[in-house]
Image (spheres, rainbow, N blue to C red):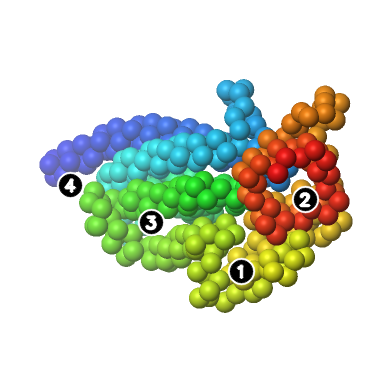
Amino acid sequence: MTSEAIGERQADQLSARHLLNAVNGASEAATTAWLIYLALSAYFIVALAGVTHNDLLLNSPIALPVLGISVTLDRFFLFAPPLFILIHIGMMMQYVVLTQKLYAFLGLVEREESRMRDTESPPADRVHPLRYELSSNFFTQFLAGPPQSFVLTFLQQLIVWVTLVLLAAIVLLYFQIAFLPFHDMSLTWAHRLYVLVDLGLVGLVGTFLPSPRIGFWSSFFYGWWRHPLFMLITTVFFAGIFAFSFFVATVPGEALDKRLAAFGPAVEIPAPSGDPVESRQVFLPTAYFFEGEVDDATGRSTSPFQRNLVVMDQDLVNDRDLAPGDLSLSLRYRDFRYARLDRSDLKQADLTGADLTGASLTDTVLTGARR
């Protein structure tokens, strides 16, 4: 080996050591951002799972983590998603920076491994020792770590795909589904836009995750060339999330809901009130996911979700502090179409302007309620 080759090899080894330190530092920062993002995702999922139809009926306050303050449900559902999107995209950008450093490190390491193989007789499959000094971050190990079993590599790729790419859109879709029985068209459209914005930003930023290239289109085509199955599955999932948000999770009676029922496969759904005049045609996927029959005893639906309020056998009024003529609840101008409010106490509630089309009010206490 010539002195020039020896000098080049030593320079590569020194550069690789410096890049190793840079990669490990970036991996630590990315891991911290990822853990914060996961913790926030877990909080939102648990909080949304805990939002009941009673809470939606009363627009009850929800406590914010760390801050220790409460906001009404409609404000929480309006402002929490965009903050979540910012945190998600900020975390992804940390991983894009990490990707660029990893590929720079890999270029030097793989060149040295090639030299190792060339000097062996016969050639051996050599692994650069610096690979074993890399951070244990799953993304770092997946891209540049030492050889691993297929199972570990698959699990690392699955974690990358689910948490970095899909999880945020699923959480944002959950926001929309959980708030749908409130029947607020403006907020439902805001939720759809949040889903669309997140999918678009993930498509833009995520294009650089599997690629060493700098340009967007070169990274895009590189990703399809190197990981065609991953890119195809991601595209299918994104299309499914978009379609569900815009065309399945609809508010009863909105323009999309009516058009889909008119032009797509539809089923007739009877009104909870039992009035045949108020029965309606519902788009088949929407009917399957949101319009199942409600058990009269338990209030449970046969569909996975509900888009109409089901508040049955609930005492919603504090009679102890209620004087004659006082208002117990303010439900002015609320949309309660096709709701099930059977046997619930709405004594002296203010229902001025409330839309109760098709709602079931069997044995509901409405003494002194304003209409």
Type of residue at label 3? Asp
Mark nearer the viewer, 4 or 3: 3
| Amino acid residing under circle 1 | Val
Name the N-terminal-most of marks 4 and 3: 4
Q: What residue did someone put label 2 on?
A: 341
User: Would residue 72 be found to the left or right of residue 8 on screen?
Assistant: right
Q: Give the residue type at disc 4.
A: Met
| Residue corresponding to mark 1 | 282
Q: Which residue is mark 3?
A: 125
Secondary structure of the residue carrying numbered label 1 = strand
Q: Secondary structure at mark 3?
A: loop
Cα distance, mark 4 to mark 1? 77 Å
How far is disc 3 from disc 2 in space, using C-alphas?
Answer: 71 Å
Cα–Cα span, label 4 and label 3: 21 Å
Q: Are marks 4 and 2 in contact (CB under 8 Å)?
A: no
The numbered mark, 4 or 2, whose residue comes first in the sequence reads 4
Q: Residue at x 33, y 40 (%)?
A: 97
User: Foreground: 222 or 36?
Assistant: 36
In this rendering, does residue 134 appear at all? Answer: no
First in sequence: mark 3 vs mark 2: 3
Q: Nearer the viewer, residue 316 or 133?
A: 316
Q: Residues within 10 Å of mark 3 (few under 14, many from 20)?
A: few
Which residue lies under the disc numbered 4? 1
User: Residue at left 57%, top 77%?
Assistant: 265
